[in-house]
Amino acid sequence: MRKSVKLETFLLVSLLAVPLAGQERSNNKSKGKPENLATQRGDNRDESKPLPATNDPAYVIGPDDVLDINAWKEPEITRTVPVRPDGKISLPLINDIQAAGLTPTQLATAITEKLKKYLTEPQVTVIVTAINSRRIYIMGEVGRPGTFQLLPNMTILQALSGAGGFTQFANMKGIYLLRTEGGKQIKYPFNYKEVVKGQRPEQNMVLKPGDTIIVP
């Protein structure tokens, strides 16, 4: 009889200890668990703020780029706007302002100066959130014709290397670049076979936004 009572007491104590131990482990775990993923990473960045498409302070804004205009404590002016084909953007109070051809810092300064007529000590920042103006086009007898992002100092040869190679019908000696200069379209020849041999290096031009490479 005594053995039965001792066994029942042992089982009862064991059953009570299991949830208590589990609760203790849970409490210890939550004590050591960070509040959120950002705390775990040490990342205090505001998730609502758009990420910049470029961190280059010398980047020159172009048509079709998308800009995040932030005016401190001025929610009516703070907004995301695209750069129109004419190179301008529209904002409350100041209406149209030229954006293309300026760096983000220069544009922020220009907006700030115009807002001084209406606001006391305005503070403006400009972030490029999408780069759509720096594009080139490759057409003709290549594996992947289409639109490509123009990288800094990209040459014709480098651009062609990203177009999937030539088809069997490509005339590699007759490639040419089309560029608009002064309102006129200029044709520049590019002989692939000569350039890859180190000949005619001047034909391997550094590309500009809007350039079109034709592979006949």
Image: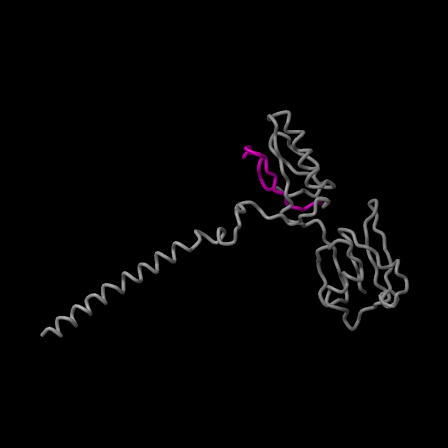
Residue 50, horizontal then vertical, whole percent: 58, 46
Taking depth in this image into account, of 191 and 185 the one nearest to the observer is 191
Location of the N terminus by quadrant is bottom left
* Quadrant in the picture for residue 4: bottom left
Q: Is residue 69 above or below residue 40?
A: above
Magenta highlight on residue 137: no
For the point 69% across and 33% down, which residue is it? 110
Taking depth in this image into account, of 155 and 167 the one nearest to the observer is 155
Residue 148, horizontal then vertical, whole percent: 71, 58
* Quadrant in the picture for residue 137: bottom right
For the point 76% across and 71% down, which residue is it? 167
Residue 61, horizontal then vertical, whole percent: 70, 44
Q: Is residue 153 left or right of residue 44?
A: right
Q: Is residue 14 above or below residue 122?
A: below
Magenta highlight on residue 77: yes
Extent of the magenta region: 62-80
Residue 113, horizontal then vertical, whole percent: 67, 29
Q: Is residue 97 left or right of residue 174?
A: left
Taking depth in this image into account, of 58 and 82 the one nearest to the observer is 58
